[in-house]
Amino acid sequence: AYEIPEYFPRTGDYKTWRMYDRSEIGFYTNTLSYKINTPFYKEITVDQEQITLPIHYFPFWEISINGKKTIPRYFDTLGRPIFSGLALPSIVEVRYNETPIEKTSNIITVITFITLITIITNKKIWKKMNAILR
Protein backbone atom coordinates (compact mmCIF):
# COMPACT_ATOMS: atom_id res chain seq x y z
CA ALA A 1 0.00 0.00 0.00
CA TYR A 2 2.96 2.33 0.49
CA GLU A 3 3.66 2.36 -3.24
CA ILE A 4 0.14 3.53 -4.15
CA PRO A 5 0.26 7.34 -4.55
CA GLU A 6 -3.14 8.08 -2.99
CA TYR A 7 -2.01 6.42 0.28
CA PHE A 8 1.12 8.50 0.67
CA PRO A 9 0.99 12.31 0.89
CA ARG A 10 3.13 14.30 -1.55
CA THR A 11 4.71 16.24 1.30
CA GLY A 12 5.98 13.07 3.01
CA ASP A 13 9.49 11.64 2.86
CA TYR A 14 9.07 8.20 1.27
CA LYS A 15 12.46 6.82 2.41
CA THR A 16 11.80 7.79 6.03
CA TRP A 17 8.30 6.30 5.84
CA ARG A 18 9.67 3.00 4.48
CA MET A 19 11.97 2.69 7.53
CA TYR A 20 8.85 1.96 9.58
CA ASP A 21 7.45 -0.58 7.11
CA ARG A 22 8.42 -4.06 8.24
CA SER A 23 6.15 -5.84 5.75
CA GLU A 24 9.09 -7.30 3.83
CA ILE A 25 10.91 -8.26 7.02
CA GLY A 26 8.09 -9.60 9.18
CA PHE A 27 9.46 -9.70 12.72
CA TYR A 28 13.10 -9.82 13.72
CA THR A 29 15.47 -9.57 10.74
CA ASN A 30 14.36 -12.48 8.54
CA THR A 31 13.19 -11.50 5.08
CA LEU A 32 9.88 -12.94 3.87
CA SER A 33 10.37 -15.58 1.19
CA TYR A 34 7.65 -15.27 -1.47
CA LYS A 35 6.82 -18.19 -3.76
CA ILE A 36 4.10 -16.08 -5.40
CA ASN A 37 3.59 -12.35 -4.86
CA THR A 38 0.72 -10.68 -6.71
CA PRO A 39 -1.66 -7.98 -5.44
CA PHE A 40 -4.48 -10.51 -4.85
CA TYR A 41 -2.56 -13.71 -4.03
CA LYS A 42 0.57 -14.24 -1.97
CA GLU A 43 2.28 -17.47 -0.97
CA ILE A 44 4.97 -16.99 1.64
CA THR A 45 7.39 -19.53 3.14
CA VAL A 46 7.90 -18.60 6.78
CA ASP A 47 10.89 -19.65 8.86
CA GLN A 48 10.10 -17.60 11.94
CA GLU A 49 7.54 -18.11 14.70
CA GLN A 50 5.92 -14.70 14.38
CA ILE A 51 4.98 -12.78 11.21
CA THR A 52 3.16 -9.64 10.13
CA LEU A 53 1.49 -10.20 6.77
CA PRO A 54 2.10 -7.50 4.14
CA ILE A 55 -1.62 -6.76 3.57
CA HIS A 56 -4.20 -4.49 5.15
CA TYR A 57 -6.75 -6.99 6.40
CA PHE A 58 -10.32 -7.00 5.09
CA PRO A 59 -12.84 -9.80 5.75
CA PHE A 60 -12.71 -10.98 2.12
CA TRP A 61 -9.02 -11.91 2.42
CA GLU A 62 -8.63 -15.67 2.95
CA ILE A 63 -5.56 -16.60 4.96
CA SER A 64 -4.36 -20.21 5.15
CA ILE A 65 -1.43 -21.39 7.24
CA ASN A 66 -0.18 -24.83 6.19
CA GLY A 67 -3.48 -25.43 4.36
CA LYS A 68 -5.71 -24.51 7.33
CA LYS A 69 -7.92 -21.41 6.95
CA THR A 70 -7.25 -18.92 9.71
CA ILE A 71 -8.90 -15.67 10.81
CA PRO A 72 -6.42 -13.21 12.35
CA ARG A 73 -6.98 -12.05 15.91
CA TYR A 74 -4.13 -9.57 16.29
CA PHE A 75 -3.26 -6.58 14.09
CA ASP A 76 -0.58 -3.91 14.06
CA THR A 77 -1.37 -0.18 13.94
CA LEU A 78 -1.69 -0.31 10.14
CA GLY A 79 -4.28 -3.10 10.20
CA ARG A 80 -1.88 -5.82 9.07
CA PRO A 81 -2.53 -9.27 10.57
CA ILE A 82 -0.01 -10.64 13.06
CA PHE A 83 0.40 -14.39 13.55
CA SER A 84 2.58 -15.97 16.21
CA GLY A 85 3.41 -19.49 17.34
CA LEU A 86 3.80 -20.77 13.79
CA ALA A 87 5.24 -24.22 13.14
CA LEU A 88 8.57 -24.01 11.35
CA PRO A 89 8.67 -23.93 8.39
CA SER A 90 5.17 -22.76 7.49
CA ILE A 91 3.52 -21.86 4.21
CA VAL A 92 1.16 -18.90 4.44
CA GLU A 93 -1.29 -18.35 1.58
CA VAL A 94 -3.19 -15.09 1.29
CA ARG A 95 -5.95 -14.78 -1.31
CA TYR A 96 -8.48 -12.01 -1.95
CA ASN A 97 -12.03 -12.98 -2.94
CA GLU A 98 -14.28 -10.45 -4.60
CA THR A 99 -17.28 -9.16 -2.68
CA PRO A 100 -20.76 -9.86 -4.10
CA ILE A 101 -21.02 -6.19 -5.14
CA GLU A 102 -17.71 -6.42 -7.02
CA LYS A 103 -18.83 -9.59 -8.80
CA THR A 104 -22.17 -7.99 -9.78
CA SER A 105 -20.51 -4.81 -11.02
CA ASN A 106 -18.04 -6.84 -13.09
CA ILE A 107 -20.91 -8.73 -14.75
CA ILE A 108 -22.76 -5.47 -15.46
CA THR A 109 -19.59 -3.97 -16.95
CA VAL A 110 -19.04 -6.95 -19.28
CA ILE A 111 -22.70 -6.94 -20.41
CA THR A 112 -22.56 -3.18 -21.06
CA PHE A 113 -19.32 -3.52 -23.04
CA ILE A 114 -20.72 -6.36 -25.18
CA THR A 115 -23.92 -4.36 -25.81
CA LEU A 116 -21.98 -1.26 -26.88
CA ILE A 117 -19.72 -3.26 -29.21
CA THR A 118 -22.79 -4.96 -30.72
CA ILE A 119 -24.53 -1.62 -31.30
CA ILE A 120 -21.45 -0.06 -32.86
CA THR A 121 -20.55 -3.00 -35.14
CA ASN A 122 -24.07 -3.98 -36.28
CA LYS A 123 -25.10 -1.50 -39.01
CA LYS A 124 -28.84 -2.25 -38.75
CA ILE A 125 -28.93 -1.53 -35.03
CA TRP A 126 -26.71 1.52 -35.53
CA LYS A 127 -29.06 3.00 -38.14
CA LYS A 128 -32.11 2.37 -35.94
CA MET A 129 -30.35 4.03 -32.98
CA ASN A 130 -29.44 7.06 -35.12
CA ALA A 131 -33.04 7.35 -36.37
CA ILE A 132 -34.41 7.18 -32.81
CA LEU A 133 -31.93 9.73 -31.46
CA ARG A 134 -32.70 12.32 -34.17
Image (tube, rainbow, N blue to C red):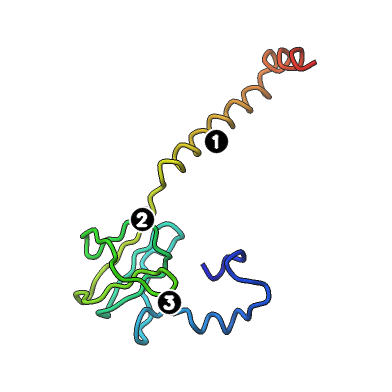
User: In 3D space, how far apart are the residues under numbered discs 1 and 3 (Cα atoms)?
Assistant: 36 Å
**Which residue is pictured at 41% across the width and 41% down the height?**
100
Res. 42 image quadrant: bottom left
Category of crowding for the residue at label 1, using alpha-carbon neighbours closer than 10 angstroms: few (below 14), some (14–19), many (at least 20): few
Question: Which residue is under mark 2?
Answer: 59
Task: Give the spatial CA distance, label 1 vs label 2.
Answer: 24 Å
Q: Nearer the viewer, mark 1 or mark 2?
A: 2
Q: Secondary structure at mark 3?
A: loop
Q: Position of residue 66 (x, y in %)?
A: 22, 64
Task: Judge by depth and name the residue closer to the eye, 100 or 53.
Answer: 100
Circle nearer the N terminus (1, 2):
2
Q: How many marks?
A: 3
In the rendered structure, the answer to whether residue 31 lies left or right of residue 131 reads left
- The residue depicted at 67 percent of the width and 72 percent of the height is 10
Q: Quadrant of residue 83?
A: bottom left
For the residues labelled 2 and 3, the Cα–Cα distance comes to: 22 Å
In the rendered view, tell whether residue 102 sits above or below residue 76: above
Specify the farthest residue to the right. 134
In primary-sequence order, the first of circles 1 and 3 is 3
Q: Amino acid at mark 3?
A: Glu
Q: What amino acid is labelled 1 in the image? A: Thr
Where is residue 75? Give x, y as percent. 35, 71
* Residue underneath mark 1: 109
Mark 3: give few (<14), some (14-19) or many (20+) Cα within 10 Å: some
Measured from the top left, where is residue 96 in percent x and y? 39, 54
As drawn, 19 above or below 94: below
Of the residues under marks 2 and 3, which one precedes in the sequence?
3
Closer to the observer: label 2 or label 3? 2
Residue assigned mark 3: 24
